[in-house]
Image (cartoon, grey):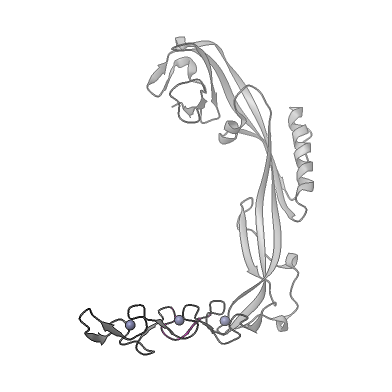
C-alpha cells in the first residue's frame, strides 16, 4: 500500500527514498460505529383552502392513532421527513380570517379603494406658475373621482383576497402527522498514533464486522476488547437516548483503517507524515505547501 519507500511527490517537491528515515510503522486503526435509525411522530392541526371536493371526515370511520398510521421510510438509514394527513380527521369550516366572505379590507386604503392624490394634494387641478389651471394628470381618470388616486393594492376595490382560504371563504381542517426518520451515529476509534480521528472517519477501510437488525446486542467476542467495551457502552447509551422516538432499526460495524506513520528528513529538518485509508490519503502537518487541512493524495 505504502509507496514511501519508492519515493513520491507532494506538489512539485519530490521525496526520495533517502529522505525517509527508519522503518515506516503500519498501524491499524479500529473504528466501531453504531447507528440507530429512529422514527418520531408528531401531530398538529393544519388547514388548507377549500374550494370543493371530497372530505375524509369522521363519517368515514374512526381516526387512527398516530402510531397506527401506515407509513414507511423510502430508504433505510437515511434521514427523511414525511408529512401526511391523518385519515378521517378532515372537516370544513368557515374561514377564521375573513369570516367566510373570502376577502379582507385593504390595509393600504382602509377599504375606501382610493388614497389622496399626492400630485394635486386632493384638489384635482394642477396650476402652473402663470396661474393656468388644468386637470391633474395623475388622478383625472381615477375610479373614485378627481383628487383621488386608485389604490394599487386592491385595484380600487377596497378589499383584497383572503390568503388563508384563497378567497373561497372556507377551509379544510385536519390533523397533520409529521414523521421524522433520523440516523443517529455514535462511534469509537481505538487510539493509536497521533493521526487525528476525524481524518480516519473520512477514508475507507476494511469492514471486519457488521450486523443489522431491529435491535442489536453489544459485541462481546471481538478480538480487541476495547471494541467490546465501546460497543457495550454505545448500545446502552442508545437504548436510553430516544425516549420520545421509536427505534426503527439498528446496525453496527467495525472498520479497520490502515495507517502508516513515516519519519522523514527533508529540507530543514525531520518531520512525520501519515498515509491512511485505502485512498492513500496523506496527512503531513509539518509540510509547508500542503492544502488547508495539511492533507493531500498520493497518486
Ligand atoms: Zn378567508
Ligand atoms: Zn386598497
Ligand atoms: Zn391629482
Q: Position of residue 175 (x, y in %)?
A: 68, 72
Quarter of the image for residue 245 reads bottom right
Q: Position of residue 148 (x, y in %)?
A: 38, 85
Q: How many marks?
A: 0
In the image, residue 67 sits, relative to residue 151, either above or below, namely above
Residue range of the region highlighted in magenta in the rendering: 153-162
The residue nearer to you, when weighing 273 against 92, is 92
Give yes or no for residue 160 being in the magenta stretch.
yes
Question: Magenta stretch mostly in which secondary structure?
Answer: loop
Q: Is residue 217 visible?
A: no
Q: Quick check: 9 left or right of 282? A: left
Tell me the residue at 55%/29% (across/down).
277
Q: Quick check: 248 left or right of 161? A: right
The residue nearer to you, when weighing 116 against 76, is 116
Quarter of the image for residue 17 reads top left
Q: Quadrant of the C terminus?
A: top left
The residue nearer to you, when weighing 66 against 51, is 51
Farthest-out residue, front: 130
Farthest-out residue, left: 130
Quarter of the image for residue 39 reads bottom right
In the image, residue 231 sits, relative to residue 125, either above or below, namely above
Give yes or no for residue 236 being in the magenta stretch.
no
Q: Position of residue 62 (x, y in %)?
A: 75, 78
Instruction: Locate ligand 2 by image quadrant.
Output: bottom left
Q: Position of residue 114 (x, y in %)?
A: 42, 84
Amino acid at each position: 500500500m505504502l509507496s514511501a519507500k519508492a519515493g513520491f511527490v507532494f506538489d512539485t517537491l519530490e521525496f526520495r527514498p533517502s529522505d525517509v528515515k527508519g522503518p515506516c510503522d503500519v498501524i491499524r486503526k479500529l473504528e466501531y460505529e453504531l447507528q440507530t435509525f429512529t422514527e418520531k411522530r408528531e401531530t398538529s392541526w393544519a388547514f388548507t383552502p377549500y374550494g370543493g371536493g371530497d372530505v375524509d371526515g369522521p363519517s368515514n370511520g374512526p381516526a387512527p392513532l398516530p402510531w397506527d398510521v401506515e407509513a414507511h421510510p423510502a430508504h433505510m438509514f437515511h434521514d427523511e421527513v414525511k408529512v401526511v394527513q391523518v385519515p378521517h380527521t378532515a372537516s370544513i369550516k368557515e374561514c377564521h380570517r375573513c369570516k367566510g366572505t373570502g376577502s379582507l379590507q385593504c390595509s393600504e386604503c382602509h377599504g375606501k379603494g382610493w388614497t389622496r392624490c399626492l400630485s394635486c394634494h386632493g384638489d384635482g387641478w394642477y396650476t402652473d406658475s402663470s396661474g393656468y389651471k388644468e386637470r391633474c394628470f395623475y388622478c383625472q381618470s381615477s375610479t373614485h373621482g378627481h383628487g383621488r388616486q386608485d389604490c394599487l393594492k386592491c385595484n380600487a376595490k377596497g378589499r383584497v383576497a383572503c390568503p388563508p382560504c384563497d378567497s373561497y371563504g372556507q377551509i379544510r381542517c385536519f390533523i397533520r402527522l409529521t414523521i421524522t426518520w433520523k440516523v443517529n451515529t455514535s462511534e469509537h476509534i481505538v487510539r493509536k498514533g497521533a493521526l487525528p480521528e476525524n481524518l480516519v472517519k473520512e477514508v475507507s477501510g476494511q469492514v471486519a464486522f457488521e450486523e443489522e437488525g431491529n435491535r442489536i446486542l453489544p459485541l462481546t467476542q471481538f478480538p480487541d476488547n476495547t471494541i467490546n467495551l465501546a460497543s457495550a457502552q454505545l448500545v446502552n447509551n442508545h437504548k436510553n437516548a430516544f425516549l420520545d422516538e421509536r427505534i426503527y432499526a439498528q446496525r453496527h460495524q467495525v472498520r479497520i483503517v490502515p495507517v502508516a506513520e513515516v519519519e522523514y528528513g527533508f529540507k530543514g529538518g525531520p518531520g512525520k507524515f501519515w498515509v491512511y485509508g485505502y485512498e492513500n490519503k496523506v496527512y503531513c502537518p509539518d509540510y509547508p505547501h500542503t492544502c488547508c487541512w495539511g492533507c493531500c493524495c498520493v497518486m
